[in-house]
Amino acid sequence: MTERFDGSFTQQEPIPEAGIEAALHVLRHGRLHRYNTAPGEIAEAALLEEEFAAFTGAKYCLAVASGGYAIGCALRAAGVGPGTKVLTNAFTLAPVPGAIAGVGAEPVFVDTTDALTIDLDDLKRKIYESGAPILLLSHMRGHICDMDRLMAICADGRVAVIEDCAHTMGASWNDTPSGRHGLAACYSTQTYKHINSGEGGLLTSDNADLMARAIMLSGSYMLYERHRAAPPPEAFAQVKYVTPNISGRMDNLRAAILRPQLADLPAQIARWNTLYRVVEAGLAATPGLQLIPRPEAEAYVASSFQFLLPDWPADKVRAVLARAAARGVELKWFGHTEPTGFTSRHDSWRYARPQDLPQTDRVLAGLVDMRLPLTFSPDDAALIARIIRAEVSAVHQGATAGPSTVPAAD
Ligand SMILES: *Cc1c(COP(=O)(O)O)cnc(C)c1O
């Protein structure tokens, strides 16, 4: 009998009851705009910022419209503008180079290791070659590089670091929360991330000047004193005259949905990591398949799973994807030369100068990715691993053609 998986890789859990109730409360009073408060009332958005600052240990926090907005806002607040060179991971998601392009800056892509992290030797080289003043570090798919070494390299090269923590909310490196190494950090609350408000973003920093600029940029008008996880009014004294309002606020409805989810996050992280370890154990020692090492210093939040089919020819990788899809297991492949679905690569971002990234290309050619939504049980995770293991093994041993009725995998 051939086992099949029937779950949905895109189905997240519902919003917890406490979030639904909080949302209804906001809907019933109607004050959805964050600066629309009754006398004595503290806006949900301001409370979320306070709670998220406390969760990460940051001094300041700003809630905004999306993770991509948070990144663009952080870059602009850090002084990045037209023509600035911004170092960033060659392996990341499209909103990252998009945010760089959005402020008129130029991405300088840094190569990728087999651990799916930024290549620190290439980073060193490119800091020197490019003279870029800033690194937008993307902890892509939750894999964290050696942050101690990265920060030493950047301090040495006088390069500021902004962290894209879209996949590392709740993760840490050597007990320092992800997002607490650099000048600022950006998080997403889009449906597929670690807390879900459909769309949304959070920006944290300890730097008063940067955060005052970010708050003004986000569209605070002259109501910045309503923020709580914010620098004191003095920080705005000059900033308020010279900072454009590039409207991108979060509203109270989304903040209300997020607050109970933030409180639940530690428990959710434990559930994600249980699923991850079941898949990892199920795929261990599969011939031809390479697992991604997870360093001891890294406390991860495994909302997705990656593995490598290193140096496999493209038709064989396609055969694995097709055969897994036929059994209900939806895998993504970063080796597609055409961008599909959410997956695109540095060579499809043609608004940026083309760059030579041989190591990234080699890694992406064998990189397979899947989501691990919390609607999966550990039994589901074990079944998924059995299916992947069987199909990788079959193709590795010589089967090439997938079944004829396979939908196109994206
Ligand atoms: C989702 C994501 C973003 C952007 O978040 P949005 O809220 O969708 O704008 C940025 N970086 C990475 C790596 C992401 O996965």
Image: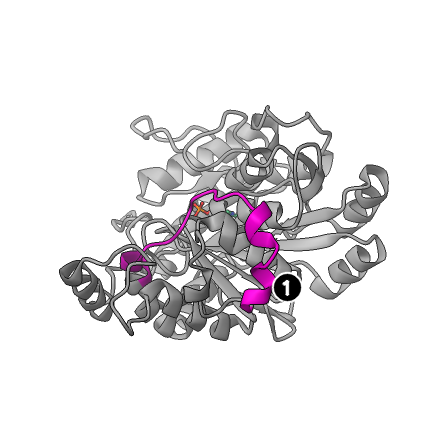
Q: Position of residue 44 (x, y in %)?
A: 32, 66
Q: Mark 1: few, some, or many residues within 10 Å (few <14, many ≥20)?
A: some
Identify the residue at image location x=54%, y=53%: 214
Q: Position of residue 257 (x, y in %)?
A: 28, 62
Q: Is residue 287 visible?
A: no
Q: Considering depth in this image, is 186 or 264 the residue closer to the camera?
A: 186
Above or below for 147 versus 200: below
Q: Give the range drawn in magenta.
A: 232-255
Quarter of the view holding residue 45: bottom left
Q: Can residue 19 be seen in this view?
A: yes
Above or below for 119 versus 401: below
Quarter of the view holding residue 262: bottom left
Identify the residue at image location x=54%, y=36%: 98
Left or right of 34? Residue 316 is right
Q: Considering depth in this image, is 125 or 233 the residue closer to the camera?
A: 233
Quick one: SS at disc 1?
Answer: loop
Left or right of 398? Residue 360 is right
**Amino acid at circle 1:** Asn
- Magenta-span inclusion, residue 47: no
Q: Considering depth in this image, is 341 or 280 the residue closer to the camera?
A: 341
Residue beneath label 1, please?
207
Point out the residue furthest to the left here.
28
The quadrant of the picture occupied by the C terminus is top left
Identify the residue at image location x=60%, y=38%: 100
Q: Where is residue 127 in the image (x, y as percent from the top left)?
A: 81, 45
Count of numbered tags: 1
- Magenta-span inclusion, residue 243: yes
Above or below for 313 versus 221: above
Q: Position of residue 373 (x, y in %)?
A: 35, 56
Left or right of 316? Residue 310 is right
